[in-house]
Amino acid sequence: MMRTLFLSLGAALALSACASEDAGADRYEPQAYVQTTPPEWTADAVIYQVNTRQFTKEGTFKAAQEHLPRLAEMGVDIVWLMPIHPIGEVNRKGGMGSPYAVKDYRAINPDLGTEEEFRGFVDAAHGLGMKVILDWVANHSAWDNPLTQAHPEWYTRTPEGGLMPPEGTDWSDVVDFDYSQAGLREYMTGSLVYWVREFGIDGYRADVAGYVPTDFWETARAELDAVKPVFMLAEWDSRDLHRNAFDATYAWEWKEVMQKVARGESGAGAMRGYFAGQKVSWPHAAMRMMYTDNHDQNSWDGIASQIYGPAYEAAIALSFTAHGIPLIYNGQEADLDRQLAFFEKDEIEWKQGRYDPLFRQLIALKTAERALWNGDQGAPMIDVPNSASDDVFAFVRGQGADRVFAVFNLSPRAQAVRFDLARHHGDYRDALSGDEISFGAESELALDPWGYRIFTAE
């Protein structure tokens, strides 16, 4: 009997030791950094930014709604509307002011239309299979926002006690919020929920998201997702925002690298280095928004086709085929050829653009090829070494018959390129021309200056 007891105790201790070892081993298993789950419809999504004021002659939701069938036919998935709220009048810039100087977070700018017209825009987009996200300005309000009187404690103060713009900026038309105030956090979260619950919008683009504490965004995301799954895009470039708050962040560094390449200040090595850094230091699930134009660049930096010059088309193609979520800006498909005034009415000239067919082809390609999908729904980029590595950037995404092989000549020199390894070998079809091609050990590929080729496996 005693011997049996000892054996039982020994077995129990052994089992306990094994359980402890198993529990200890668990802590060494890789853990996913990103804890949020993006909506299913973001997997292959393409974003289109709309400045409602400038988008049509009328500058209204009702007029913009007439463009929705065209955007849906292009393949656009997410329509991002710049701020739709009433604009402050005190310290206003220009004649019409900045839409980022928000006077009332739960109202609509009457210049853009009525609540019912906005609801009609959202419903029409949904009926065409598209989603709508709003631009949200959580960091600051207009000087004459009623909150400055009703809740003066919600605002940052100068040493003398006055209201102030966000520190270190020239944003003289707005005043800074103080996010140490729980009441402000509750109000702002409630306002975010309001537009999702009452109008059915599908998420937000957060203006200067890094100027607002991350824990605010994390709480807001949880409350929004409790209403419906939303897509959250941060105007910021920080990995920590992806953990529990945002699905996508701005790939500012990609834009900077691409523009340096276009100016001849960098080459393919800089682009290769950028994506290598992304691969090792950012979670694969993080969607990085890549763009060749947006409202800030167009208004303050210049015209995209001039900024990128002869590299413009290659830059557009790379933004759709690399690991990231692509953006099209407000008339870019109509070859927007001037800087739109930011504080005044300045209508887009709509025409059949040179780049419209390219955008359509690239959207169709991204939709059809799962390797090119966003975040962890898409495949990682695998570098393909080549004989002109200073000028040519090549990569494969996916495996077997689901591969996409892309080659970009990031230089003003024609290239005849050979590839050192077999990572891309196989039979392909040119994604844009439809031509068939095979790659093997002796294959060579000719590229025009700033030329590119995208191939899908057969």
Image: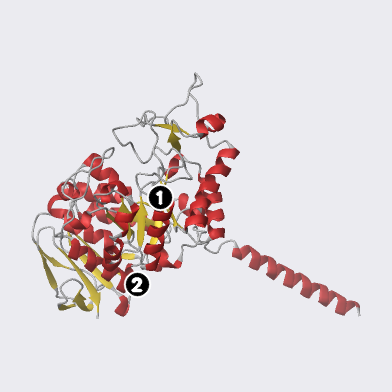
Q: Residue at x 37, y 49 (%)?
A: 113
On the rendered structure, is 162 left or right of 82? Answer: right
**Which element is circle 2 on?**
helix
**Which element is circle 1 on?**
loop
Where in the figure is residue 173, as x and y percent of width and height?
Answer: 37, 31
State the residue lying farthest toward the top.
160
Q: What's the amino acid at mark 1?
A: Thr
Q: Nearer the viewer, residue 371 or 320?
A: 320
Query: Splitting the image into 4 quarters, where does residue 289 fall?
Result: bottom left
Query: Splitting the image into 4 quarters, where does residue 15 fall?
Result: bottom right
Q: Which mark is residue 235?
A: none
- Mark closest to the chain's N terminus, 2 or 1: 1
Q: Which residue is mark 2?
A: 370
Circle 2 Cα neighbour tier, 10 Å, few/some/many (<14 / 14–19 / ≥20): some
Q: What's the amino acid at mark 2?
A: Arg
Q: Which mark is residue 114?
A: 1
Q: Is residue 453 above or below residue 434?
A: above
